[in-house]
């Protein structure tokens, strides 16, 4: 017996040694990639040391010089609230327009993405060529930056809200379709098999077996995308596609520091309000009303009398769907009457877009293009993404413990957690491109501004998600550790982080994928990377180069998706460990 125990201990130590060796090797590789990315993106301790004081000086300049004695004086008195907000009559309508762009684009994109998702899912009975075509299309749509779409539509339809609406809609269709068809493919197959045994058609199986399972996820993703689209729509004004972006960029360029701060404050307030509203809507829509339990009875007539509410659900559901559809129709009638283009503009714009698309697929002088320059800029973009996301991951993880309410207990610590959450809201409420604009103004042109922009937004976004992951853990391991005398750090390490680590890794990998797509926007504002090539060639009407760069990015994003999926399977699902065979 003692010999068997010794053999098991030896086997256990071998397994642990192999796991530790793998962890050390992967950690060293990660560090090497991080330092290489930092070198390519000009991101190191020396540049940070020299650049951050300029950033803090710039942000200090944006603080309005309000005076307590003149706080409620008139607009002519410096230091009053009225003096600080003298441009509010201009800014508030632009905020309203930005909100309408986000809402209108999200609603129509959710409807289109729902149809595309069932056509692209492997378990929804559409032909393989259709699935492949839709997946390639949505990969293209979500890889093309919103600003690039906005530039195309502004050149076609002119300055206004409609180009912004179309740009956001196309990008959102691409992003949501991927999330939706992955949700469909993850649905349980038992209801489908049950309906198939009853002779149901493919449409009936989708309606009654798949749709009830994926509807909560679809609605949750839709609400989440509304928040994201509002943040994204704040930058579309940079190219004349409507919204508050043009006002913000003008204030930054003209050094209207006080107006930069009030514009950012308006954006953060609306993002926070949308966050709270969408959270309540998610709970209301997804939980719904409680209904009486239906116990199966052979007497259908008696069942109808006893469970009237249950039998009325379908009719009530159809009425709700009809009312929502009517409300959406009336909303779009109002939206296009308010922000739409004339028939002549529409005809001319469609002809222009046709010419742009035709030029995208005719590559003139292809072999003479500067491919080295293009690939170098893609490498710089990946370096910006990797250095920024990894740094933000570490910062967000450390700060997330201070925002988790199951860790920060008591009045003082609870107040600190509340303040930390508000800090996360401020950081994530400002779009990455806006952070890029601010850092370009503060530290100069180049990839360093892009890295710092990603760090700021991702620290806020990931910090909040990590904190929610800590709060969602099971408390039983923590109570067990307390019972055996573990200290606070040990309880956090072995009772909380061990459970939240899969969520932490999955979110970090997803954010790298997302930033690979989003970072192209940074080049538009001078923060380095492939966006600079986009901006240059759009300005020169080299639409063939724009298409080539987009296809390269699609390939890069697909490689990143495949790599991150493999990492998720290996380190979240775990690698198989052979069972101990001793004693047999």
Image: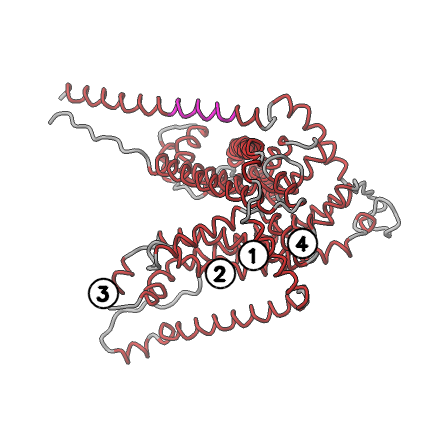
Q: Are marks 4 and 2 in contact (CB under 8 Å)?
A: no
Quadrant location of the N terminus in the rendered image: top left
- Which of the two discs, 3 and 4, sits closer to the camera? 4
Q: Tell me which numbered mark, 1 or 2, is placed earlier along the sequence.
A: 2
Q: Tell me which numbered mark, 4 or 1, is placed earlier along the sequence.
A: 4
Q: Are marks 1 and 2 in contact (CB under 8 Å)?
A: yes
Q: Determine the secondary structure under disc 4.
A: helix
- Which of the two discs, 2 and 3, sits closer to the camera? 2
Q: Residue beneath label 4, please?
A: 155
Among the 4 quarters of the image, the one containing residue 78: top right
Q: Determine the secondary structure under disc 1.
A: helix
The front one of 584 and 370 is 370
Q: Tell me which numbered mark, 4 or 2, is placed earlier along the sequence.
A: 2
Q: CA distance from mark 4 to mark 1?
A: 17 Å
Q: Tell me which numbered mark, 2 or 3, is placed earlier along the sequence.
A: 2
Q: CA distance from mark 4 to mark 2?
A: 25 Å
Q: Residue beneath label 2, please?
A: 112
Percent coordinates x, y for residue 191 in the rendering: 29, 61
Q: CA distance from mark 3 to mark 4?
A: 55 Å
Residue 344 vertical position relative to residue 7 in the rendered view, above or below: below
Q: Residue beneath label 3, please?
A: 197
Residue 35 vertical position relative to residue 511 in the rendered view, above or below: above
The front one of 208 and 555 is 555
Q: Residue beneath label 1, please?
A: 169
Q: Residue furthest right?
A: 76
């Amino acid at each position: 017996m003692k010999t068997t125990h010794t053999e098991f201990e030896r086997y256990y130590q071998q397994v642990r040694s192999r796991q530790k060796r793998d962890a050390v090797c992967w950690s060293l590789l990660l560090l090497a990639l991080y330092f290489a990315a930092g070198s390519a993106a000009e991101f190191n301790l020396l540049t940070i040391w020299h650049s951050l004081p300029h950033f803090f000086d710039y942000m200090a300049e944006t603080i309005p010089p309000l005076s307590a004695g003149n706080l409620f004086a008139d607009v002519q008195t410096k230091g009053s609230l009225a003096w600080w907000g003298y441009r509010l009559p201009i800014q508030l309508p632009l905020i309203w327009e930005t909100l309408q762009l986000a809402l209108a684009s999200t609603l129509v994109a959710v409807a289109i993405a729902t149809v595309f998702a069932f056509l692209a899912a492997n378990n929804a009975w559409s032909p393989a060529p259709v699935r492949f075509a839709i997946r390639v299309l949505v990969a293209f749509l979500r890889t093309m930056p919103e600003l690039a779409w906005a530039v195309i539509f502004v050149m076609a339809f002119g300055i206004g809200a409609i180009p912004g609406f179309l740009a956001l809609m196309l990008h959102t269709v691409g992003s949501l379709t991927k999330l939706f068809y992955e949700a469909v493919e993850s649905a349980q197959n038992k209801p489908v098999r049950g309906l198939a045994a009853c002779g149901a058609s493919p449409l009936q199986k989708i309606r009654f077996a798949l749709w009830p399972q994926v509807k909560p996820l679809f609605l949750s993703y839709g609400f989440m995308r509304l928040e994201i689209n509002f943040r994204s729509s704040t930058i579309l004004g940079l190219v004349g596609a409507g919204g508050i972006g043009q006002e913000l960029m003008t204030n930054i360029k003209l050094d209207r520091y006080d107006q930069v701060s009030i514009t950012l404050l308006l954006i953060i307030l609306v993002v926070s309000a949308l966050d709270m509203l969408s959270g309540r809507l998610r709970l209301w829509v997804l939980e719904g009303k409680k209904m009486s339990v239906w116990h199966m009875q052979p007497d259908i007539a008696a069942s109808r009398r006893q469970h009237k509410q249950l039998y009325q659900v379908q009719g009530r559901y159809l009425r709700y769907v009809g009312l929502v559809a009517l409300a959406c129709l009336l909303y779009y009638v109002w939206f296009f009457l308010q922000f739409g283009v004339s028939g002549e503009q529409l005809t001319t714009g469609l002809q222009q877009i046709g010419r742009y698309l035709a030029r995208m697929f005719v590559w003139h002088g292809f072999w003479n293009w500067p491919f080295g320059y293009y690939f170098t800029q893609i490498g710089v973009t990946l370096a910006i993404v990797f250095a920024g996301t990894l740094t933000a991951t570490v910062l967000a993880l450390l700060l997330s413990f201070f925002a988790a309410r199951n860790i920060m207990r008591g009045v003082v610590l609870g107040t600190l957690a509340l303040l930390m959450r508000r800090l996360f809201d401020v950081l994530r409420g400002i779009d990455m491109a806006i952070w890029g604009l601010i850092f370009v103004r503060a530290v100069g042109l180049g990839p360093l501004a892009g890295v710092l922009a990603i760090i700021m937004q991702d620290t806020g976004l990931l910090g909040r998600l990590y904190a929610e992951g800590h709060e969602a853990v099971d408390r039983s391991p923590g109570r067990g550790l307390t019972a055996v005398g573990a200290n606070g750090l040990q309880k956090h390490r072995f009772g909380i982080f061990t459970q939240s680590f899969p969520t932490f890794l999955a979110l970090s990998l997803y954010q790298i994928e997302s930033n690979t797509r989003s970072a192209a926007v940074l080049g538009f504002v001078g923060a380095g990377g492939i966006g600079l090539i986009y901006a240059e060639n759009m300005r020169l009407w080299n639409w063939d180069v724009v298409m080539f760069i987009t296809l390269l990015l699609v390939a890069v994003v697909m490689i990143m998706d495949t790599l991150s999926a493999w990492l998720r399977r290996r380190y979240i699902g775990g690698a198989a460990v052979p069972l101990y065979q001793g004693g047999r």
